Image (cartoon, helix red, strand yellow):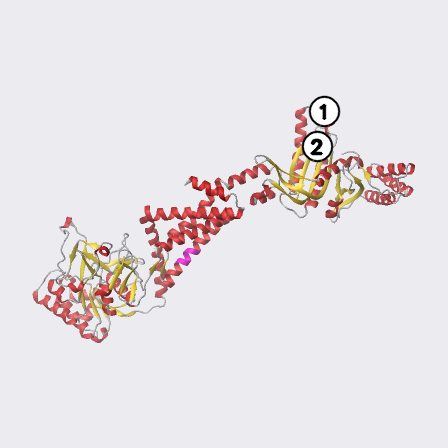
Amino acid sequence: MRLWLNVFTQHLARLPAPVQRVGLGVLLGSLVALVILTRTYLFLGRFFDRLEQATLDFRYDLQINHLESRSTPIEDIMIVDIDARSVFKLGRYGRWPRSYHAVVVDYLTQGGAKAIGLDILFAGEEERDQDQQLAEAVTHAGNAYVAVYLLAADSTNFLYPMYQNPYKPLSPQSILPVSHAVQRTLYSAERIEGPFPALAQCAQGLVAVNTWPDQDGVHRAIPLVMSFANTTYPTISLRIAMAVLGVQRDAVRLTPGQGLALGQRRTIPVDEQGRLLLHYYGRGGPKGQTFRYVSYYDVYSKNLPAEFFAGKIVLVGSSLPGQGDLVSVPFGSAFPGVELHATAIQNIIKDDFLVKTAPRTTVLIVLGLSVLISILSLFIRPLKGATLTLNLMVVYFVVAVVLFVRDGLWVEVIRPEGAILLSYVAPLMYRYFTEERERRHLKRAFQQYISPLVVEEIIRDPSKLKLGGEKRVVTMLFSDLAGFTSVSETLPPENVCLLLNDYLTEMTDIILRYDGMIDKYEGDLILAIFGAPAWRSDHAVRACRAALDMQARLAQLRAQWASEGKPPLYARTGINTGEVIVGNMGSKTRMDYTVIGDQANLASRLEGANKQYGTSIMISEMTYEQVRDQILARELDRIRVKGKQQPVAVYEVLGWRGEMLPPDRGRVLEHYLRGLHAYRERRWDDAEAAFTAALELNPDDVPSQVYLHRCTAHRLHPPPSDWDGVFQMETK
């Protein structure tokens, strides 16, 4: 398995990232489905079935509430109830003579009952005339079905297994023609208890009245057929339904787990043991008013007109506590057993069944949900995945409830819900041990050089850090300390390191604040990139703002260092915007994210060009075009850096546009710009006058000093006629 997984993941690694995630989701989802299905069906089946039954009971309860809100009593099936009133009027039930039942059967027959089911065990012979009266009543009825009980042996009470069926010769018409192979799948009894022989012979049929609950004692389904000693009996519900529908014994075909066919009329869905999942219509009992209950005493005493039972299916049984005929159902614990049979009969004759989805359907649901959730969990963050998982679990459960309550479809809940949950957990564990480990590695590697927001962007799309580059317009910032070599020679090495680390830490924090990336440190030089690896459309503005904040912070540090007896530091910054190749450069085992290209070299040259003009921040014309609306700058010159033929205009960054400059500074700029215009038109006298006026206001304005010196030189040695005003830089 591990070898197969390794091969699979190696193949996935060659595909695009989204395809990789989908493929991995399919793999993880399939494994989750395999685990869920094998564990729940092969090893923990009983436990999961109990959980599923609990959810089914909840759905039953909701369905009953739904039905009771709009249902009326079912009149086609009546229950003659041996109730408390009957016992009060006729005496203790155990002492009733069988002639009472004969009177009831005769009266039901007189009224024209369609079928009579006696959910009473008339075991053993009693007084001869009483037995004969009952047998004659049943014979006269011609549609009365008498109960038998199919039981397990109980040797502790001397109830040993029976190997012959004593009722087979007495009532052969009661036995269904079912193959031995099918019989082996049914509930198989070891003993049979039934009526006295005369009654067995005259009954229209002997019917099993066992209800056979689930392992937790709750009746959710009822058997339709049961076997004993190589014979198969229908239950009272099936046999009466067959009679009402006119289905003969030889037309019955049972396929366990699929259905019980009643000829061509209909097929009853049954489980592997031939049980029908009951579709209840109410909470049961005389007060439940689901079926029409009439007191046994009223029938015996003929308090009701006989015609009241005309065309009705009549079951005779008991709702009396203590008679052992109250059972547990999904929504209660005192449901009359006779009403279980009435419910099953109504289900069959009205073709009104609850249907459980086949196991293969559950397998497909589990597989589909597992794959879907696994794929989605690989595309979204864990917290969102948890929210999605919980919502989907709720939605699935609601859908399952609605399908059961409205459509009578039992869709499994526990296995699919377990699949949903585990399908979230499996990718989460995978991501924790793989992707999250990679995330932590990336975060540790880059958080010192890139702002946390940018790190998160890279983590969301690690493909940005693959070996190789792309062309992109970015802004590069070079910053270097002026004369740091001389400063370092005056300090012990450890003090040099401490001073430099303080400086680099402060400057780095500012760069990261503007989402810049530290490309590299070279001694006291800082190279930063704005607009990569995470794109920012205002990368040029961010670089200029970072440069201004760096100068302001360095001024504060100089004051602090002066109080500590440390030497002052001054920095020069060059900024350029242009198209470069940006990406990871190096080998597959060691790489650096950096930029290469002429535009990067130009930024480095501008940093050095600051020395010529006594400036701190110099930007190229490409950068200026992107920041002119937000940054205040003055044009310094048009220069041609060493090794390049194409000249470039350069500017000094003075501050934020909109900031109030000191009045003298503003007038200095006016004189300077007037002098620069005159200089480029070769009006040396006007240029000298303007630069001199600027220097009178600010003697330390180095650009004015530079141009004043150039004016003097050009007057003595005029430039050629094709002079374009470009200054050639001779040093880097």
Residue 342's place in the image compared with 586, above or below, is: below
Residue found at the very far left of the displayed protein:
128
The image quadrant of residue 249 is bottom left
What residue would you read off at disc 1? Answer: 489
- Tell me if mark 2 has few (under 14), some (14-19) or many (20+) residues whose alpha carbon lies within 10 angstroms of its own: few
Identify the residue at image location x=38%, y=46%.
35
Q: Quadrant of the N terminus?
A: top left
Q: Nearer the viewer, residue 580 or 444?
A: 580
* Marked residue nearer the N-terminal end (2 or 1): 1
Looking at the rendered structure, which numbered label has been put on residue 630? none
Q: Are marks 2 and 1 in contact (CB under 8 Å)?
A: no
Q: Nearer the viewer, residue 564 or 147?
A: 147
Q: Is residue 399 magenta?
A: yes
- Tell me if mark 1 has few (under 14), some (14-19) or many (20+) residues whose alpha carbon lies within 10 angstroms of its own: few
Front tag of 2 and 1: 1
Please give the count of numbered marks on the rendered protein. 2
The image quadrant of residue 517 is top right
Q: Position of residue 135 (x, y in %)?
A: 12, 67
Mark 2–mark 1 Cα distance, whole angstroms, equals 21 Å
Residue type highlighted by circle 2: Gln
Looking at the rendered structure, which numbered label has been put on residue 560? 2
Residue type highlighted by circle 1: Glu
Residue extent of the magenta highlight: 395-400
Where disc 2 sits, the SS reads helix
